[in-house]
Image: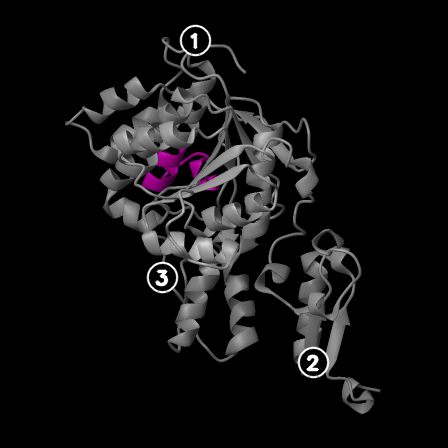
Amino acid sequence: MCSSDLGVVTVLLAIPSGGPELVRRVDALCRSNGLRLLVLPHVRDLFGEVLLSDIRPVADGDLLGRAPADIAPGDMAHYVRGRRVLVTGAGGSIGSELCRQLAQLGPARLVMLDRDESALAAVQLSIEGRTTLDSDSLVLADIRDADRMREVFRHHRPQVVFHAAALKHLAMLEQAPGEAWKTNVFGTHHVLAAAAEVGTDHFVNISTDKAANPISVLGLSKRVTERLTASMAFDATASGKFVSVRFGNVLGSRGSVLSIFAEQVARGGPITVTHPDVSRYFMTVQEAVRLTIYAGAIGSSGEVLVLDMGEPVRILDVATRFARQRVPSIPIEFTNLRKGEKLHEELFADGEDDTRMVHPLVSHVQATPLAINAVTEMFEQPRLSLRDRLDQLVALGMPAQIGRAHV
């Protein structure tokens, strides 16, 4: 007897712990039989009894990668509750979700900083339901401006800082490496220096898996920011905990693969994939933010925390599933890897040990510190290209002038 004989039109998958592989298999069966699939969220995402509103259609995140890492808000709220918290890049995909989750953890004040006034309006609307734009907690500023960073930090004196502001589009930074210097490298230094000056006690820098054995300007610049952040653990002017967090592609972020596929489908195709075998690690934006906040709770100063993201996902498989869900006949074309792109991303650089001291899915890696004067000296080498200067900075050992012990 088939589903049509029984009048079945919808299937409810009530096994939220089953993982993405089960969801993919059931989703494929349902689609081949013309059925709609609904899923029940994981128990950690439910509050009290299950309501009809909790049941939802299959999302793209259900079909990719692995089950989300089990990091509960209660495990990470203690250093945020009742504290002054500042988020740079607050209007971005990760920064705005950071602000939304942090607002639920009871900070004494949540300061949201971005250079994009429209993005600040959007994040205020998502949290407060209004866009007055006259709140002292909304800060219009560019991290490239060192004086402005000092002014903001002296005024708000944040105890906790999440540094999400960055340039992240790989291909554009290959064309304009100087912008990576100004924002990702020197902008990060400005934020670190301002935080140290006012005595910030928890600082979390958001990095990327492209910083592991980097071959792109983006990856090189973010590896330098990891090392600059680590150097604060040895800097006599800083007294707090300075850590970085490294993870892969974030579903739903601006410029992510799914948003590109959606735009290509809307235009009638084709969907483009760089290489038949290219693979990437994926996580949801909510999971990325939980890890970021958790890093501030469990990391030791100078460390990079890395999430176990399971097995990488082949982008062609993502494109095929995406097309099948929307327009099965849409073509998929291959465009070849661009300069700076890897066929397969890595989570750990050569020589980094995978040590899991607190959570079974979170690794602690000790970053090699890099003092800002080494960056400044390299920046003043006109005979080298900006990309070569970044490459040499990544390869530098620990400068002799760094000497403070770990916090």
Residue 87: quadrant of the picture: top left
Instruction: For mark 3, give the secondary structure.
Output: loop
* Front disc: 1 or 2: 1
Q: Nearer the viewer, mark 3 or mark 1?
A: 1
Relative side of 235 to 26, left or right:
left
Q: Residue at x 55, y 39 (%)?
A: 292
| Residue that mark 3 sits on | 335
Residue position for label 1: 403
- Crowding at dot 1, Cα within 10 Å, few <14 / some 14-19 / many 20+, comes out as some
Q: Earlier in the sequence, mark 1 or mark 2?
A: 2
Secondary structure under badge 1? loop
Q: Position of residue 51 (x, y in %)?
A: 75, 66
The colour scheme applied to this rendered structure is one colour
**Image coordinates for residue 363, horizontal then vertical, percent:** 61, 32
Q: Quadrant of the N terminus?
A: bottom right
State yes or no: discs 3 and 1 in contact (Cβ < 8 Å): no
Tell me the residue that label 2 is attached to: 35
> Residue 58: percent from the left, percent from the top?
64, 68
Q: Which residues are magenta?
A: 207-223
